[in-house]
Amino acid sequence: MRKVFVSELLGPKREGLFNDVIDMEIENIVRSLSSNPSAIEEPFRGATLKEMLDEAKSMLGGSIGDHFPIFGRSLDKLTGWSDRLEKCFSNLDGYVQMVLDEHLDRGGSEISDHEKDFVHALIELSSKKNTSASCLTKDDIKALIMDVLTGGTDTIVVTMVWAMSEIVRNPRVMQKLQKEIRSCIGRKPKIHRSDIMQMKYLKMVVKETLRLHPPAPLLIPRECINHCQVGGYDVFPGTRVLINAWGIGRDPRIWGDNSTKFYPERFKNEVDFVGEKFDMVPFGGGRRSCPAFNQATTIIELTIGKLLYLFDWEVPDGYEELNMEEKGSLVVHRKSSLFLVPRKHNRQE
Ligand code: HEM
């Protein structure tokens, strides 16, 4: 399944369409900010799908029955958790089914290869004509779509919101970042992926955000399959394992006395952040690490780059200090919404 996900959504086959959709979405955010700054909340505010995904994420945080299966399951029934779980996943399943039906109704033949998206590709892999080992069932397709919806939406938005919070709280960082972006872009109307490659400080800012605010601070709960030893402790098969990515990213033994400070310059020398050295693990590590880390960081860099290139950002009058309290279980958000005022940057200056 992971192989299908990587080749059909993230691989070069789908790159053109994926990039076009991302660029269009970033343009939409910028347009809504330019025409009506009070619409800043719009792209991130909930439609029904968002509510469904929020509910699913809160349920994935686990129940009493997940931790104490023997008596916990009965408690889950009594407290109404089991009914809530049933309803939540039947709603999500209904949504995914609707997406699938829409794709089936349109039929694959009248759509050009360029227009075919991830769901079309999955349907092709499930067709009777496909005799390869990766032939998918309907449930496989639904699971893969749910992976994208649950794993790929909130994580990116949460990281962007934390990045904007830290940038605005640290005017020194904001000025340095804007200077870099604006000098790399000059007077060009658009930022391209190739421009981002030159923006070293922007990359440092995104890494520093993921270090201090990994969207999934305990990653995804895993279960140990084989007996192993970690740091001298025995971990037996069946043990549920939680990795404290939040704690690792703030560990003063790795990051020094200023480990809780937002200081992107600490990434001047290349630091691995995709789980090879484990100094920070916002995307997990090993065989089940996030397959979309590359795409995710590019989307965040492009969006932040664009927002900082076109606008100067301020906290609204009356809000002196940004509240940085956190809330959530599987994915950790800001406790209070982020309100910022964008002022269009005059490119003649
Ligand atoms: C800033 C953005 C993101 C962060 C921080 C993030 C983080 C993570 C983490 C921590 C895991 C679990 C790794 C582990 O347990 O070792 C994971 C898994 C996964 N992520 Fe992401 N993710 C991000 C964006 C995305 C996007 C955009 C997609 C899809 C388009 C995605 C799809 C997945 C999938 C499918 C898995 C499961 C992989 C497996 O079990 O083999 N993620 N991600």
Image: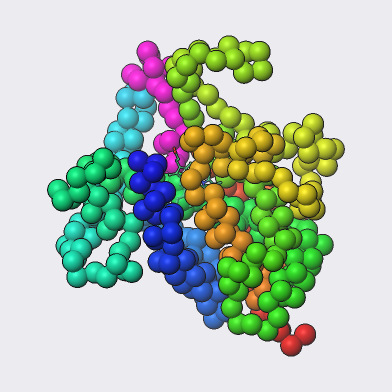
Q: Name, please, the residue furthest toward the right.
A: 257
Decide: is 38 above or below 75.
below
Q: At 46% across and 51% down in the image, what residue appears? A: 152
- Asked which colour scheme the image uses, the reply is rainbow
Task: Name the quadrant of the C terminus.
Answer: bottom right
Q: At 66% across and 55% down in the image, what residue appears? A: 206
Q: How many marks?
A: 0
Where in the figure is residue 293, as x and y percent of width and height?
A: 54, 49
Where in the figure is residue 57, as x and y percent of width and height?
A: 44, 41
Q: At 49% across and 34% down in the image, what residue appears? A: 287
Q: Is residue 320 visible?
A: no
Where in the figure is residue 198, as x and y percent of width and height?
A: 69, 66
Q: Main secondary structure of the magenta part?
A: helix
Magenta span contains residue 68? yes
| Of 327 and 292, the residue lying toward us | 292
Q: Name, please, the residue furthest toward the front.
A: 132
| Of 227 and 172, the residue lying toward us | 227
Left or right, 153 with respect to 283, comes to left
| Of 83 and 44, the residue lying toward us | 44
Q: Is residue 131 visible?
A: yes
Where in the figure is residue 137, as x and y percent of width and height?
A: 22, 42
First to last magenta residue range = 52-75
